[in-house]
């Protein structure tokens, strides 16, 4: 069996409490075609000692002052060489089946340029399970229409960074870097650029656990939302897209409640959801399948959210 080549970068700074579990979640999958790079920002909390325990299994690691998380990510990716790419922050976790699932999807669907899980597990700082986020869709029109804006909606709508993987060819098209001038939403701004070149496919399989704890910089919600909106407005302007005008008109006329007209409207004007799922034994053939249908994302009208 051919195993697609995977590059994973972990940026870290004074995250000794979480770092070892993150490293284990990557290495203990025993994936045969893995390139794993850790870029530490000169930690003083014992992180270096933790990394040294696993250095014989790492492609590269360093511990030196840098320009922050996004600078560390860019430094790591500049050293990487594999076809499928992602970064895993030093407090999040992969599951034992993550790379096997990812590799089988990327091998099966050569046209897919980037993927993200529709499911994300949430854990706390002691690794206790908090809940499960479930998304229903990924679509550029809905993305431009605020549907995936961080902190505006519930966690179930986000494109979770730790669950997102892409092909190197897409990374090269968008400039080969995360914007290091952005403090909070480097991933969100990167998704804006990815969407310009490729459709995002959702995987109906659990791939990661996102750790929620009080030390996270994204706990500061308002600057986070401001940066996200700034990035989104820029890309909405570039794409000359304002789908809310159409969708709000539909909701105002209450056509979404019409059994006679709404199926036709959804087919012609709705967003197309693309999902990759694992076929069950009850279907004619098992394995990965692609499924799509049209939907209306939520839209905000007079302060209310419509679905």
Image (cartoon, helix red, strand yellow):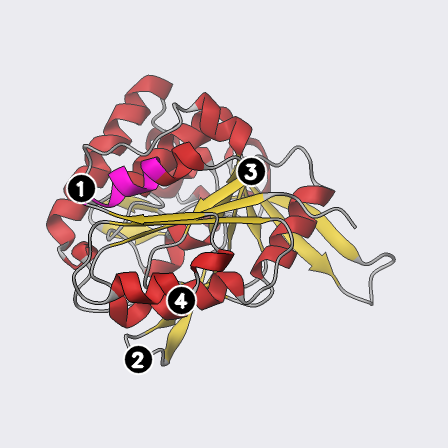
Work out how far the residue at label 4 is from the one at label 3, CA to CA, in angstroms: 24 Å
Look at mark 2 in the image and give the residue it sits on: 126
Mark 4 or mark 3, whichever is nearer to me = 4
Residue visible at 30% across and 80% down?
126
Mark 3 or 1, nearer chain start: 3
Q: Which residue is mark 4?
A: 53
Quick one: label 2 or label 3, which is nearer the N terminus? 3
- Crowdedness of circle 1 by 10 Å Cα count: few (<14), some, many (20+)? some
- Name the N-terminal-most of marks 1 and 4: 4
First reached walking from the N terminus: tag 2 or tag 4? 4
The label nearer to you, 1 versus 4, is 4
- Disc 2 element: loop
Residue 307 is at least partly visible in this image: no
Front residue of 13/46: it is 46
Using the image, determine if residue 172 lies above or below residue 285. above
Residue 209 occupies which quadrant of the picture? bottom left
For the residue carrying disc 3, how many other residues have a C-alpha within 10 Å: few (<14), some (14-19), or many (20+)?
some
| Distance Cα–Cα, label 1 vs label 2 | 26 Å
| Residue 115 occupies quadrant | top right
Distance between the alpha carbons at the discs numbered 1 and 4: 31 Å
Within the magenta stretch, is there residue 55? Answer: no
In the rendered structure, are the residues bearing label 3 and label 1 in contact, judged by CB atoms less than 8 Å apart? no
Residues in magenta, as a range: 65-75
What SS does tag 3 mark?
Answer: loop
x, y (%) of residue 147? 35, 45
Going from the N terminus, do you reach mark 4 or mark 3 first?
A: 4
Q: Which residue is mark 3?
A: 82
Circle 1 residue: 183
What's the distance in space between the residues labelled 2 and 4, CA to CA?
22 Å
Distance between the Cα atoms at labels 3 and 1? 27 Å
């Amino acid at each position: 069996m051919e195993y697609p080549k995977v590059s994973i970068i972990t940026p870290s700074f004074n995250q000794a409490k979480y770092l070892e579990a993150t490293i284990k979640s990557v290495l203990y999958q025993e994936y045969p075609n893995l390139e794993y790079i850790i870029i530490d920002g000169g930690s003083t909390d014992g992180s270096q000692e933790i990394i040294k325990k696993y250095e014989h299994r790492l492609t590269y690691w360093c511990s030196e002052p840098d320009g922050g998380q996004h600078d560390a990510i860019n430094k790591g990716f500049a050293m990487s060489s594999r076809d499928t790419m992602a970064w895993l922050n030093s407090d999040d976790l992969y599951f034992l089946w993550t790379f096997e699932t990812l590799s089988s999807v990327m091998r099966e669907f050569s046209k897919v340029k980037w993927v993200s899980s529709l499911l994300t597990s949430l854990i706390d700082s002691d690794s206790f399970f908090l809940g499960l986020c479930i998304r229903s869709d990924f679509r550029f029109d809905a993305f431009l229409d605020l549907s995936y804006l961080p902190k505006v909606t519930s966690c179930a709508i986000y494109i979770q960074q730790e669950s997102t993987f892409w092909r190197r060819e897409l990374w090269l098209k968008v400039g080969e870097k995360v914007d290091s001038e952005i403090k909070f939403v480097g991933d969100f701004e990167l998704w804006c650029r990815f969407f310009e070149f490729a459709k995002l496919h959702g995987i109906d399989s659990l791939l990661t656990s996102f750790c929620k704890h009080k030390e996270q910089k994204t706990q500061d919600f308002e600057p986070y939302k401001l940066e996200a909106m700034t990035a989104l407005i820029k890309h909405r302007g570039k794409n000359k897209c304002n789908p809310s005008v159409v969708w709000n008109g539909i909701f105002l006329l209450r056509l979404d409640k019409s059994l006679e007209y709404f199926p036709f409207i959804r087919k012609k004007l709705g967003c197309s959801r693309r999902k990759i799922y694992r076929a069950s034994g009850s279907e004619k053939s098992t394995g990965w399948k692609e499924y799509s249908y049209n939907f209306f994302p939520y839209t905000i009208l007079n302060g209310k959210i419509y679905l």
